[in-house]
Image: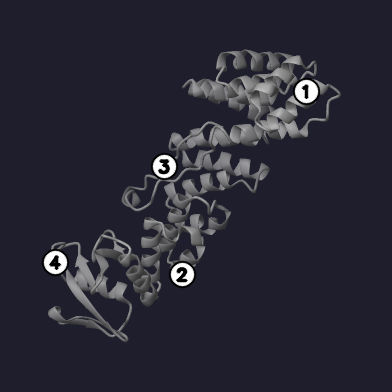
Amino acid sequence: MKKLIISIVLLSFAAFLTACSSTQSKSSKRDAENLKILEQNVESTDSFFNEGKNFLEKNEFDNALNSFSKSKYSEALFYKALVLNQFGKTDEAKQIFEECVVKNVLKDESNYNLAMIAYDKSDVEAARKIMNEVVSSNPKHTGALFFLGNLKYLENDMNGALGYYEAALKTDPESTDLWEAVFSVRLQKEEFVKAWDIREKLDKNSPETVLNVLKIAEITGNYIKGVLFVPDDFKKDKNISRQIRILLTKGGNFKEAMENGQRELKEMSQGYLIIDRKAEGPGSYVIGLNKDAVFIVCSKKPEELMTVTISGSKVEIKSQSKNSESSAISSFAENFCLSR
């Protein structure tokens, strides 16, 4: 399916959450939908069709086109159009898909591809009309449901998008693409607990997704569980590492947050790292770490950097005669900055 980019715009959280994509790539999702149909076909006695099928599964498109063109099997027509579309011969592919519709050869799949061609040509309404016809004919067509959900998303109709995504999930409950689409809707609706609850359904191989989950962990108070969500391979990612430090600090594991930060500082030219922050509202602060000390900066006086002393269970700013008997440096920083 064509890539429909879905970005998170969350008012007060706009600068807080990274862009999230719940879409399929044109080269993988659309092919997966079509190859699924190919796999369901009963083996034909037409040797050219079977030969073309083997070539197509190996992405040998020149050979596949040659074999499908020679085949007399009715469904070879559909796959000839599919291969032509792969080659960028859109107009030829469109004509053959239309012929398939007339001849009732994989009609729903032919319409699905016609809708995608229309969308590629920026004819959104034509694509929508054809996709609705596909869903009307086949209410369980995953690709068409997903596509219509993406259109609703882009129109900012989150409830409409969610309806289509959830209908698609009933047909393909293991799809990480669909779960990430639902995740994006939950973020847009600021339903952060519901977004957190589906984290294990998401693609952990996407650093953007992992980072968004970590930020939802912060919002929902799942600090240490958020840290445990991160695959080892991503822990050195700059943005993910910073969010891990924030979660460790808020979760009361300040020692590990500092240790992680100090290890990073040894490998960086930059002289400091952020280990926690409150981004907005009263008492906003940044807790930073350099090679020599931990410091607090309050948003009301960003030019002032105040060094923090941490000893046992006490957090203290000697120059300000401020101290706390709690080692919870995050709450100390917030209360301190509220008083500034």
Residue identified by numbered label 3? 7
Foreground mark, 3 or 4, reads: 4
Q: In the image, 134: left or right of 265? A: right
Q: CA distance from mark 2 to mark 3?
A: 27 Å
Q: Residue at x 13, y 62 (%)?
A: 303
Tag 1, which secondary structure?
helix
Residue 298 sits in quarter: bottom left
Residue identified by numbered label 2? 224
Give the quadrant of the N terminus. Answer: top right
Q: Amino acid at mark 4?
A: Glu
Q: Position of residue 96 (x, y in %)?
A: 66, 14
**Model colouring:** one colour
Q: CA distance from mark 3 to mark 1?
A: 42 Å
The one of 323 and 220 positioned closer to us in this rendering: 323
Tag 3, which secondary structure?
loop
Q: Is 260 rendered above or below residue 204?
A: below
The one of 5 and 154 positioned closer to us in this rendering: 5
User: Which mark identifies residue 304?
Assistant: 4
Q: Is 169 rendered above or below residue 29?
A: below
Give the mark nearer the N terminus: 4 vs 1: 1
Q: In the image, 143: left or right of 317? A: right
Q: Position of residue 198 (x, y in %)?
A: 55, 55
